[in-house]
């Protein structure tokens, strides 16, 4: 039997703080793999933990193309997906931090 044991350092957060910062807390759980104990008047009420990531044997990146089998192989979706892939390979990614140049008159 395979048992996966994952240790998390639990951070305490009040219900009020959870209400005000839910989006940030969920981001820390989902992407930062952090865990929280939600407390009410100092008493633990719930635990918020990341969902264990499934181990993939092929180690390939999952993409929209992995949904083959859900749609017919000749569905237009796959043609459009290939067009998008080809276009994105040709275009240089934009730097989101680059400043726009002001036009001089």
Image (cartoon, rainbow, N blue to C red):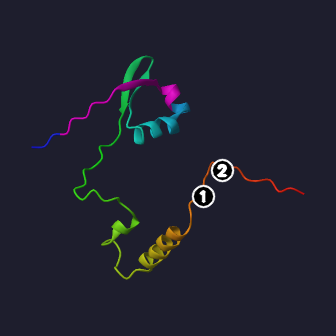
Dot 1: element? loop
What residue sits 29% from the left and 43% below the top?
52
Residue that extends furthest to the bottom in the rendered view of this protein: 74
- Left or right for 17, reference 96: left
Q: Residue 6: x percent and y percent?
A: 25, 34
Q: Is residue 87 above or below residue 99?
A: below
The label shown at residue 94 is: 1
Span of residues in magenta: 4-18
Q: Residue 19: x percent and y percent?
A: 52, 32
Q: Residues at badges 1 and 2 in contact (C-beta under 8 Å)?
A: yes
Q: Quadrant of the C terminus?
A: bottom right
What residue sits 49% from the left and 76% below the top?
83
The label shown at residue 98 is: 2
Dot 2 surroundings within 10 Å: few (below 14), some, or many (20 or more)? few
Q: Magenta stretch: residue 48 in it?
A: no
Residue that extends furthest to the left in the rendered view of this protein: 1
What residue sits 66% from the left and 50% below the top?
98
What residue sits 33% from the left and 43% below the top?
51
Q: Is residue 27 above or below residue 68?
A: above
């Amino acid at each position: 039997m395979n048992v996966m044991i994952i240790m998390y350092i639990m951070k305490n957060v009040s219900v009020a703080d959870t209400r005000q910062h839910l989006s940030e807390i969920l981001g820390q759980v989902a992407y930062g793999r952090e865990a929280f104990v939600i407390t009410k008047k100092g008493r633990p009420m719930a635990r918020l933990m990341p969902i264990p990531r499934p181990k993939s044997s092929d180690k390939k990146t999952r993409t929209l193309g992995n949904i083959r089998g859900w749609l017919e192989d000749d569905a237009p979706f796959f043609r459009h997906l290939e067009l998008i892939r080809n276009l994105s390979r040709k275009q240089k990614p934009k730097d989101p931090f680059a400043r726009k140049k002001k036009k001089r008159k």
